[in-house]
Image: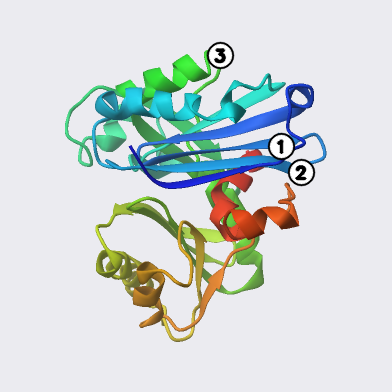
Amino acid sequence: MNQHTVDWIDSRLTGEVAPACTLWVIVGADSAAYAAVDARGEVLAAVQRDYSEPNAPFWRIGPHVQRMLESSPVWHLPFGQRQGFVFHPNTTLVPRRLFQHGDLSGYFRLLLEPDDYAYTCEELTPWDAYLVSATDRAQARFFQALFPRARLRHSAAPWLLAARQLATRQEHTVLANVRHRIVQIAVLERQNLLFYNTFTFADGQDLLYYVLLAYHQFRLSPEQVPLWLTGAIVPESELYRKLYAYVRDIRFAEPPAIWRLPREATGVALPPHCYFELMSLPAR
């Protein structure tokens, strides 16, 4: 079931400490991740798993995901709070002036094949827009079983808000969050969001194509505008080498300073940029 696995658990995280901590969770269509954070914002555990079938229907992989979550000792600790988010590629941005709350399904008539979806929306106040999502009903039921009283929230919303903080530093920002065979790409001008979309890729050539497509669409030069990366990509990977052949200024985005990842965690788990999505969740 699992391809890439990261388990970093601080020895201080025990059943006695957990009630003062929050477990932040992303249940994705391609992977799952969660982090345990104490009241001071210190990360005491980080778990990340990629599914071996990232494009499979959720009704088929759901039982495997359940077993995967339950296999970690962290999952069973008595946390004071559990905050859940979903991830999938079925999202679209709608300006407020065009938004109709009573017809969320209408925004997907030309984007998705007819199916059973749970439609939700989240306001993106800085851009006077809404992120509308269509969650596969099996994934929605799975989420609601884990978080019975929670509303469906998509992890793209806090990720985009964290991207806005990053964009204060330059005139244009191209940011790519590399997940397990899915990439999220955002383009900002200062802090104004110009573009957001998700793409499924099979290899580094696919990933490169979608990144360069974003540059081309807004007439940005890959030689002048840096590419910021977050997520499951490191300099030693084939994905990185493909990108670097065309974009020579590649930078890894530091996560928002809301949480603190202990220094010893980076030596045994992943570099901080890999946790950018998880660490942006409190931005909501």
- The residue located at (27%, 36%) in the rendering is 108
Give the numbered dot on residue 149.
3
150 relative to 264 in the view: left or right: left
Do the CB atoms of the residues marked 1 and 2 lie less than 8 Å apart?
yes
- The residue located at (60%, 42%) in the rendering is 46
Q: Vertical placement of 220 versus 58: above or below?
A: below
Q: Vertical placement of 244 versus 156: above or below?
A: below
User: Looking at the image, is mark 1 or mark 2 earlier in the sequence?
Assistant: 1
User: Looking at the image, is mark 1 or mark 3 earlier in the sequence?
Assistant: 1
Q: Vertical placement of 40 versus 102: above or below?
A: below
Q: How was the colour assigned to the protein in this rendering?
A: rainbow
Q: Which residue is mark 1?
A: 37
111 relative to 238 in the view: left or right: left
User: Marks 1 and 2, how far apart in space?
Assistant: 5 Å
**Quadrant showing the C terminus:** top right
Q: Residue 56, position in %: x, y?
A: 24, 36
SS label for mark 2:
loop
- At label 2, the amino acid type is Glu
Q: Which residue is mark 2?
A: 42
- At label 3, the amino acid type is Arg
- The residue located at (51%, 77%) in the rendering is 226
User: Marks 1 and 3, how far apart in space?
Assistant: 21 Å
**Mark 1 or 3, closer to the camera:** 1
